Amino acid sequence: MSASTSIDRSDSKRLMVFAGRSSRQLGERIAARLGIELGNVTLKTFANGELYVKYEESIRGADVFLVQSTSRPVNDSIMELLIMIDAAKLASAHRINAVIPWYGYSRQDKKSAPREPITSKLVAELLEAAGVDRVLSMDLHAGQVQGFFSVPVDHMTAVPMLADHFLERRFAGELPEELVVVSPDAGRAKLANHFAEKLGATLAVLTKQRPDHNEAEITLLIGDVEGRAAILIDDMIDTAGTLCAGAEVVRNAGATRVMAAATHGLLSGRAVDRLRESAIEEVVVTDTVALPDGAPEDMFRVLSVDRILADSVHNVFCDESVSDIFAGENQLF
């Protein structure tokens, strides 16, 4: 017997999961975790670049979950999600939930200079204008992004999963007992401290200044890394400039090994080449964003967030707490 494409509750409430083109594989894994098939939707791009969406089955009265990371190509991914939301609204879906593992434009969350936009707020307004009823996202770059929405936003985190990964490897003897968690900047110190507590590790903090966008200069290392294996932890790796510069400082300060971990492996531009040439021996990321072609398998370990997202989708559908999944540890800001 083939799997159904929806879950029915006793009150006839239905759950259906669809995925955009940036998160098709992740969407399939989430649906499999829920015991259903991924919904059938046609997504295509016309010759002039316009996007087209059509649901190939009835979604009337269903709780629809649309899985789409707003990753490369960022603007196409956002527009595709907006059209999927609009199409679901016009098809009379009961509730439209956007599952956005990586929320694009999240770094543009405030005005740092005159005449700049607050683009992450604009994206929130676009999602609401399209008709979204709820948003689920993972490891947002800044907590205030949640406040840009007037609809509920469920924040999920991969930090406990990343910590468990390193704990298991330490228990297996792959990693030494002496670990130090390094924050790439002062703004991520709280995240790094939380991560270090889970590992029973010490904490070090790098300070930096940014002469321009996507450029960083490390100015100071606070904490002792000598004789320890170092794990640099961040929410994302984009161009990897900050990460590689920090790894060099940490290694020169006496760290025996340098590894990196992040939820979102954006890996833009020369990021992969920079990481290959750096002091970092291994990078652990999740599948919120697909790795670019050519990323060396011996350097990257990819952990799937399908269970986290599936559990969150299930609890939202059943009107249960999402925070209970993380024992309240999904508020890290």
Image: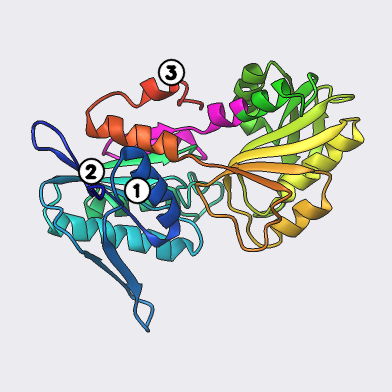
Q: Which mark is residue 327?
A: 3
Residue 145 in the magenta stretch? The answer is yes
Q: CA distance from mark 3 to mark 1?
A: 27 Å
Label 3 Cα neighbours within 10 Å, binned few <14 / some 14-19 / many ≥20: few
Residue reaching furthest to the left? 11
The percent coordinates of residue 306 (x first, y second) are 44, 40
Q: Residue at x 44, y 54 (%)?
A: 25
Image quadrant assignment for residue 249: top right
Q: Residue at x 60, y 21 (%)?
A: 194
Q: Residue at x 52, y 33 (%)?
A: 158
Name the foreground residue: 146 vs 310: 310
> Which type of secondary structure does the marked residue at label 3 adopt?
loop
Label 2 Cα neighbours within 10 Å, binned few <14 / some 14-19 / many ≥20: some
Image quadrant assignment for residue 7: top left
**In terms of sequence position, does the residue under pointer 3 or pointer 2 come before the other?**
2
The percent coordinates of residue 76 (x first, y second) are 41, 66
**What residue span does the magenta drawing correspond to?**
141-164
| Residue on which the image places disc 2 | 133
Q: Is residue 187 at least partly visible in the picture?
A: yes
Name the foreground residue: 190 vs 113: 190
